[in-house]
Image (cartoon, helix red, strand yellow):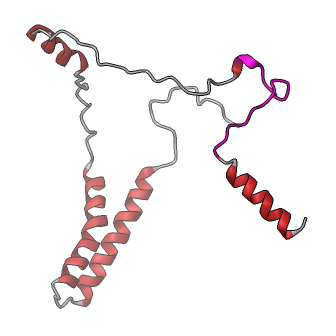
């Protein structure tokens, strides 16, 4: 193609940009029944007029969608060694954090006690966790490979 013919082709493309293409139905890969109308019809939807609800129906609607969950079961009772382990686990670092933020002078024994409490609490909780099945599992352990 020469530059002059390319310019002429572009002019034809631009000139026919808004023209609609007329196709023969034989060229279409779909049946004529699926062709879209050339201009879509517009439909106006008006809101329906509903009667005003009665006072009794408002109360019924409020009760119908309201859900009250059942009261949760009480938390399990924790024995004293477990409580002490949790206090040690969080208490040691908490003391170190407060002392550092308040710029307190800490003795060596206080540092050692806080770190030992943290490590001891962690170890106590891990040891008490156990690997065995729960006591109420019964005689059947399920599928054991």
Residue at 65% in and 31% down: 143
Q: Is residue 30 left or right of residue 76?
A: right
Residue at 46% in and 37% down: 134
Look at the picture and state if 68 lies above or below 56. Answer: below
Q: Is residue 141 left or right of residue 57?
A: right
Occupied quadrant, residue 59: top left
Occupied quadrant, residue 100: bottom left
Residue 65 drawn at (x, y percent) = 25, 20
Residue 45 drawn at (x, y percent) = 36, 20
Is most of the magenta stretch helix, strand or loop?
loop
Residue 138 drawn at (x, y percent) = 51, 26
Write the start and end of the magenta stretch as one range: 18-33
Residue 91 drawn at (x, y percent) = 24, 68
Which quadrant is the C terminus positioned in? top right
Between residue 4 and residue 31, name the one nearer to us: 4
Residue at 46% in and 24% down: 42
């Amino acid at each position: 193609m020469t530059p002059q013919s390319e310019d002429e082709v572009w002019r034809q493309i631009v000139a026919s940009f808004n023209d609609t293409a007329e196709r023969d139905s034989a060229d279409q890969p779909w049946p004529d029944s699926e062709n879209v109308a050339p201009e879509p019809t517009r439909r106006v939807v008006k809101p329906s007029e509903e009667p005003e609800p009665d006072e009794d129906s408002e109360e019924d609607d409020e009760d119908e969608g309201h859900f009250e969950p059942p009261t949760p079961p009480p938390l399990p009772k924790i024995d004293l060694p477990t409580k002490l382990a949790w206090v040690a686990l969080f208490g040691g670092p908490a003391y170190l954090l407060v002392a550092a933020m308040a710029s307190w002078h800490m003795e060596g024994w206080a540092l050692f006690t806080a770190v030992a409490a943290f490590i001891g609490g962690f170890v106590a909780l891990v040891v008490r966790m156990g690997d065995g099945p729960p006591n109420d599992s019964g005689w059947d352990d399920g599928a054991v490979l």
